[in-house]
Amino acid sequence: MSASAIEFVDVVKRYGSVTAVDTISFSIQRGELVTFLGPSGCGKTTSLRLIAGLELPSAGTVRIAGQDVSTRAAADRNVGMVFQSYALFPHMSVIENVAYGPTIRGGDKKLAIERGHEILTMLGLEGLSTRLPSELSGGQQQRVAVARAIVQQPDVLLFDEPLSNVDAKLRRRVREEIRDLQRRFNLTAVYVTHDQEEALAVSDRIIVMSNGKIAQIGTPSALYDRPSSRFVADFIGDANLIEGHVDNGRFRAEGLTLPLDMPGPDRPATISIRPERVILEKSGAGGKITHASYLGSRREYRIETVFGALLVSAPITDVAFQAGDEVGVSLPVGGYTLLVNESELPSARVSAQ
Amino acid sequence: MSRIIAGLNRLGGLWLLLGLAAVLIAPWYKLTPPDTGAGSSILGSALTEISAQRYWLLPPVLAMLAFAGLRVKSGQRWQAHVAVPWIAGAAALLFLMQAFGIGLNGPILGAIGQAFPAAALGQPGLGPGGFVFAVAITGILADALAARGFCRGERFAANAVVFVVALLTLFVLFPILRLGSTALFTPEGVFQPGVFITRLIAPDLWGLGCLYGQPRCGVVINTLILGILSGVLSTLLGLALALLVARTNFRFKGALRAISILPIITPPFVVGVAIIVLFGRTGVVTGWLEFLFDMPRTRWVYGLPGILLAQVLAFAPITFLVLLGTIEAINPTLEEASKTLGAKPLDTFRTVTWPLLRPGIAAAFLLAFIESLADFGNPIVLGGGYDVLSIRIFFAVVGARYDLGNAAVLSIILLSLTLGAFWLQTRWLGRKSYVTITGKSDAGLSAPLPGPLKAAAYAAVMPWVIFTLGVYAIVLIGGIVNDVGRWDLTPTLRHLATAFSFEIGENGLQFYGSAWDSLQTTLLVSAIAAPLTTAIGILTAWLISRQDFAGKGSFEFGTMLSFAIPGTVVGVAYVAAFNVPPVDITGTMTILVICFMFRNMPVGMRAGLAALSQIDRSMEEASQTMGANGFLTLRTVVLPLIRPAIFTSMVYAFVTAMTAVSAVIFLVSARHNMATAYIMGRVENGEYALAIAYSAVLMVIMIACIALIQLFIGKRQLGRRTDLQTLR
């Protein structure tokens, strides 16, 4: 068997007539942090619960550490999970919560409590061990939940939208803490979120899901720079989608011809270009500014061109355009990418917002 | 605990060990079976019975041996083997076929007799071996299903589902079906489906004579008239009470709430007896009326008026609670809006409050209607010539006109009526009757009750209060005075002495009183039934709210069903089902406990469901991911958090077992008599003072026990989690 920490082979999960997870396969390596990303109802939480054993697959195989666990209950797997609501037991103190797992598995209670104190100390919670969860702040509760999940050295640590109950201001710090922790203990971690920025920030790899299927798997930069479908391009960051066709190794749209790395056969096609990759020039023509906004850290423009409307994000410089200005527009090589799976996941919405 | 489980698992699991013991060692039958001539067996286990040519016992033995073999071959997770569910299913099926196919007097079908000559002698009911085997094969089946992913692979949950389903089938569904089939047999035991129709359309059931001035109506019509009148009056009284409590500055609200609990801990009959003592031909009030106003003494209280009086007294607190909930759920801003639009108080009540109350009123009416149909205690004491279904059923089973088939038909009619009302209540009103509470605070004050309505409410409530006080005064003093019926109030302990005399002599403590036996049985049965009832109720609630499994819908329906079946019907059904092999348990204490368990479990279930809906489900999931199986999760996480629900269920189960009469009256025996049955005997003999004394003692015991349970389970209630959001 390979060294995969987690492996899904053609996993399906149905609830009655609804298919929540539709034949997905992937594998996660040891020590990796992988994120399930997608809109609500895409099957990402179900996939996480399938790893935890809180759901069992309707078909297909789930392996953890090389072992087939497809019919094994949560209690018989070695996983740690941090819940969205933290799910701390309100009738137990912090240390009782943390020592719960080792105790319930039949271990020595003294040892379990010792181990619990160790973990609490590592997470900077040593002074809180006798408190009840209701006496802790939100951030402390979350750290206790993490401590409780890792105390048994699980094969895999699962996070179900761990930041959704954290103040917007604190999110950046908490997600850095999670990432540090995962690296420090060399944990295999799976993380669920619907927030693309969060996913880009914490992950080694991201699994983008849509309608129960995997839309694309890749590193954050690969997904951002080379989305394979309209859905991924749209869901992660903002994207300008330009319709045209591949013709003789080049992408052509009205008033636009771009060279391609891997053009493939001639066909109708779409390219995606990120707003910050579009270059605007004072001199020249081709675009007309329809809307300009100042956002503090950058400027945003909407531009009318012959090949469609574009959203452009420009760094703050001395150059500022006004609505109505004529500008030159250029799309640099390497800044755009051809959507290869476009036909598979048609999107109702068209091009730049 | 978890170490014991782990140890058992290493040996192949509790169920396999039990199963092997059941087929190899334990006596299979309850009694020694008839001698087949092949030599009598020593232990009478399934194995040795086979050697006595009872070859139909082979499947259980073979199945258990096969499982033992699989355990040796496949190791600890042997239940995951493909063959296990098939072997277990086949063994269970063959086990059931032989158990029901070969009765006490031989096989039911001739073909069975040809296959097994020894079957002609018949077989007695199941004994320890047979029951333990049934438990073991059920458990193995559940384990095997769990190993294939049933209940998310959770063994405890799978076992719980399978066992609860099996128990409900055996103790709720099977008796009803058996009763239904009994309706097709003549009193002589001949199968004759036509007899069902004859019984169903009998004129003494449906006669409408009383509406045309003839002396009496059919028993079904009587029952319906009583039910409707009782429902209407109880609802009106409950409404008056609820309006007074919720919408006026009535000063004795607390006392009113306290009084409303009394009927729950009042043994049946006692209200009826008190009414007789007050209003009977020789009653206290009757005497005063004759003395003061020269009113002739009559027997008016026996019959419809008396029953109605007792029922309204008993059911008004129930309708009160339902309607109070409805009134308090009405958003006061609606009434304020009406006022700002210029409506006068009475108009506001008529156009806003009343329409919003209507679903609650319908629900309260149906509840009282169902209770009235099921009521047995009041009609039997006060009925006189007024026959209702529950009484007719009783006399068809225990009276001189013994006819189980007729009792079955009457039961089916009664059951149809209650189920119909129950169905109306859940389907038609289910959604309307609960005003959703949004969690937003409702600003504004609810409108005070308009003057005329307030006066009407007082006018309805005051006689009820006086009447209740009178009844309970009789209960309070009746047992300790010479003869309360003749208003001879000389204090005496003679009634208590008759029932509860004891002596501490050279032979130690000796009980002479006539009531000790029944009191002892009652306490024992109630004490055993309360925790069991609670356990199965809470477990069922947990399954319904937390587990997803095939057939969950019908599972829920089954649990609801046991709530709607009148006690009298349950009693008759149990007699029909459990008087004969294979499950031959009438006359034992077990059947009393079982009867209470399945009659009262819905209350525990509802309390559990309400409590569980307040608890974030991910806490249990967290426990599971940390390695706790379903049982440990339940014990360490769920139960501590739903303690109040457990308390409610325990108290209710205990108190109901102490005061129940309608079902147990069929199930008591000379050896295991219950207090209520004993009291009923005293009432029939006219020993009212003794009956009242005993009832008062029961009430004191119940209050003491409630206090004790409260102390034991603890009142610690956890505040709702404030910082954590609830699930999704």
Image: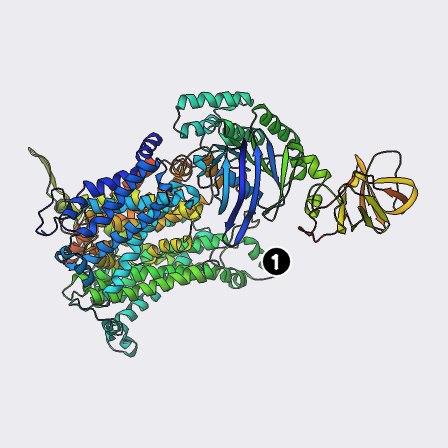
Q: Nearer the viewer, residue B66 or B110?
A: B66
User: Which residue: 34% across, 62% down?
Assistant: B418
Please, is residue A132 above or below residue B153 in the view? above
Direction bottom: furthest residue = B212
User: Which residue: 58% across, 59% down?
Assistant: B338
Could you tell me if residue A114 is visible in this image? yes
Q: Quadrant of residue B111?
A: bottom left
Direction right: furthest residue = A283
Is A106 situated left or right of B14 in this image?
right
So how many labels did they put on this image?
1
What is the image's colouring? rainbow
Identify the secondary structure beneath mark 1.
helix
The residue that mark 1 highlights is B340
Please, is residue B281 above or below residue B333 in the view? below
Residue B500 drawn at (x, y percent) = 15, 43
Is A278 situated left or right of B141 in this image?
right
Please, is residue B506 above or below residue B561 in the view? above
Could you tell me if residue B267 is visible in this image? no
Is B480 situated left or right of B264 in this image?
left
Is A338 situated left or right of A103 in this image?
right
Residue B191 drawn at (x, y percent) = 20, 68
Q: Nearer the viewer, residue B277 or B491?
A: B277
Using the image, name the chain to which the residue with label 1 belongs: B
- Mark 1: give few (<14), some (14-19) or many (20+) Cα within 10 Å: few
Residue A80 drawn at (x, y percent) = 50, 32
Residue B690 drawn at (x, y percent) = 16, 50
Q: Of the residues shown, which amino acid type is indicated by label 1?
A: Thr
